[in-house]
Amino acid sequence: MVMIGASILSANYGHMAEEVRRAEEAKVDFFHVDIMDGHFVPNLSMGLKVPEYLQDITHGTKIDVHLMVENPDIFIPKIAEASDMVSFHAEATKFLFRTVDLIADNGAKPIVALNPSTSISNIEYVLENLYGVLIMTVEPGFSGQSFINPMLKKIDKLKNLILTEGYDTKIFVDGGINTTTAPKVVEAGADALIAASAIYGKDDVVKAVQDLRASANF
Ligand code: DX5
Ligand code: ZN
């Protein structure tokens, strides 16, 4: 079963408890929290306290934080404490092993995110230490963008590498995921799909999650 994560970036921030409730009713596997600093990406989003607030209003659904920030090490201890999974960008830090260890030492599962143009060779040696790789299928920073097609090749290549090496690293895919792109990324090897507009951009969130799940588990 492919996991589905609801990205709260497109949720209504004034009614977050209700937005969380609707996604939990649809049994999403995790919530995805996009934290942006205005430097690594040209946008600002949520602050460091959001995972903690989410913990208070969720009912056991896992929390996955996506750090789109420069110097992720500064924020990781506080973020990891209130999250199940934490991803940072390979492009944002020089010392990947150190940052991965920092996440694990603070009790969360480490995930490395890659911008669309970043090659998977950058994470070849750290791959076995990771819970997951987050393949960005749009340029990070905004929801509602179109899926970048050559990323299917990248997912396929990463899946082959993971299988050849015998690792159990999971492939997360983030950006432009909808009922059309979901089956393609799953076929290429994705284990978890993250969606903002395909879930919170719809009036019926429960149906949106069901449709996405059905398209991904064909
Ligand atoms: C983009 C974020 C994504 C975003 C996805 O920078 O990392 O998580 O919320 O939005 P959609 O699903 O609308 O492409
Ligand atoms: Zn994200």
Image (spheres, rainbow, N blue to C red):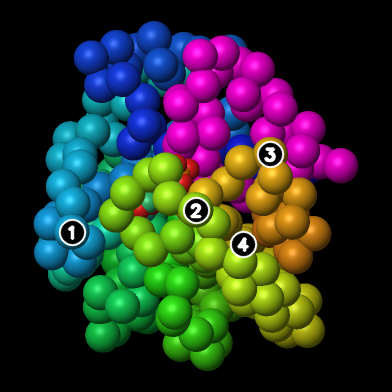
What span is in magenta? 192-218
Secondary structure of the residue carrying tag 2 is loop
Secondary structure of the residue carrying tag 1 is loop
> Which of the marked residues, 4 or 3, is nearer the chain's N terminus?
4
Q: Amino acid at mark 2?
A: Ser
Residue 42 numbered mark, or none = 1
Q: Amino acid at mark 3?
A: Thr
- For image coordinates 78% across by 84% down, the residue present is 164
Q: CA distance from mark 4 to mark 2?
A: 20 Å
Whether residue 175 is situated above or below residue 89 in the rendered picture: above
Q: CA distance from mark 4 to mark 3?
A: 18 Å
Q: Residue tagged by mark 2?
A: 146
Q: Are marks 3 and 2 in contact (CB under 8 Å)?
A: no
Note whether ligand 1 is within 8 Å of mark 3. no
Using the image as rendered, state which of residue 190 and residue 76 is in the foreground: 190
Q: Are marks 3 and 1 in contact (CB under 8 Å)?
A: no
- Confirm whether residue 169 shows in the render: no
Camera-near label (1 vs 4) is: 1
Category of crowding for the residue at label 3, using alpha-carbon neighbours closer than 10 angstroms: few (below 14), some (14–19), many (at least 20): some
Residue 124 numbered mark, or none = none
Q: Residue tagged by mark 3?
A: 179
